[in-house]
Amino acid sequence: MNKRRKQIYPDINPMAFWTRQYALKKRNREKNNHGFSLIELIIVIAIIAILSAAIAPALIRYIDKSRKAIDIENAMVLFKGAEMAAAIGSDDAAAGWGYAASPTQNKFPNFTVTASGHNSDFDKSKNKYVITCIAFARGMNYQSANSKTDWENAKFKCTANGNSTEEKNVRQYTNEFLNFVFHEGAKDETYHGDGNNTYDGFSEETVKFKYTKDPGHGAAEIWMICVNRNSMAPEIWIGDKNINGRGANKPIHALYRIYPNPCEEYTN
């Protein structure tokens, strides 16, 4: 009986059997797997290109708007400091603020601007008023052609550098402002057009611009602490000094109002 069984059911090695079955299935899979065809690959690449073209502009706009929002938040902090210095600072600081807002003074940079938040040089709106810049600081990296110093004029400094009582009071106001925004390291700094300044170089107190592109009328370079001559209220503007093709050693130049009521370039 056992002899007959061995003839009908010869011994089979189970491991060898399943190994052959696996190899056979693998060969069948490889035979049927031809990968992507050229047409399929082209279609996939085209879909990726279309999606990228549709998403990339929206992503860039979102990033730019986020950076503008951060700049507006920083301007709000500067505005609060300027407001507090004018309202609850020393008597000398209050006198300096009032003098800077006087319609007769011409010792500080004055700009005719529009209610829409632009310099009247490129906005012909009839609704205009005058602002006076009391202090300014760079908000972006600038390398002086002469000194090769990065972040030149990086600290806030007063635009009054004379010895009259009125100018000393304006400097006192600037110091009060710096106290309120915790920029004590910049106190007593004034701007000298001859280049004999002591505040060049990057500082931990530097308020950097997050948005550094040109939104329409030139890229911003400096923060400007200004007083509205009509209302005597503070305003934060951003402007330029040496960039936008204006040349070296040019006076500061207001571009955009950023707080309060930011111009449309910073809200859209």
Image (cartoon, rainbow, N blue to C red):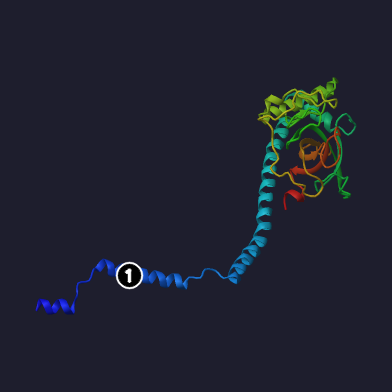
Give the residue displayed 68% in from the left and 37% down from the top.
Answer: 77
Which residue is the site of mark 1?
20
Please name whichever residue, 40 or 100, is drawn nearer the observer in this view of the structure: 40
Please name whichever residue, 98 or 189, is drawn nearer the observer in this view of the structure: 189
Exactly how many numbered labels are in the figure?
Answer: 1
The answer to whether residue 220 is left or right of residue 5 is: right
State which quadrant residue 92 falls in. Answer: top right
Furthest residue toward left: 1
| The N terminus - image quarter | bottom left
The answer to whether residue 197 is left or right of residue 70 is: right
Please name whichever residue, 14 or 35, is drawn nearer the observer in this view of the structure: 14
Q: Residues within 10 Å of mark 1 (few under 14, many from 20)?
A: few
Give the residue displayed 82% in from the left and 47% down from the top.
Answer: 217
Residue 254 location, x and y as percent? 82, 40
Give the residue displayed 71% in from the left and 40% down from the top.
Answer: 209
Name the kind of residue labelled 1 in the image: Arg
State which quadrant residue 134 falls in. Answer: top right
The answer to whether residue 173 is left or right of residue 16 is: right
Residue 240 location, x and y as percent? 81, 39
Please name whichever residue, 248 or 80, is drawn nearer the observer in this view of the structure: 248
Residue 197 location, x and y as percent? 79, 24
State which quadrant residue 146 falls in. Answer: top right
Q: Helix or strand or loop: what does disc 1 sit on?
A: helix
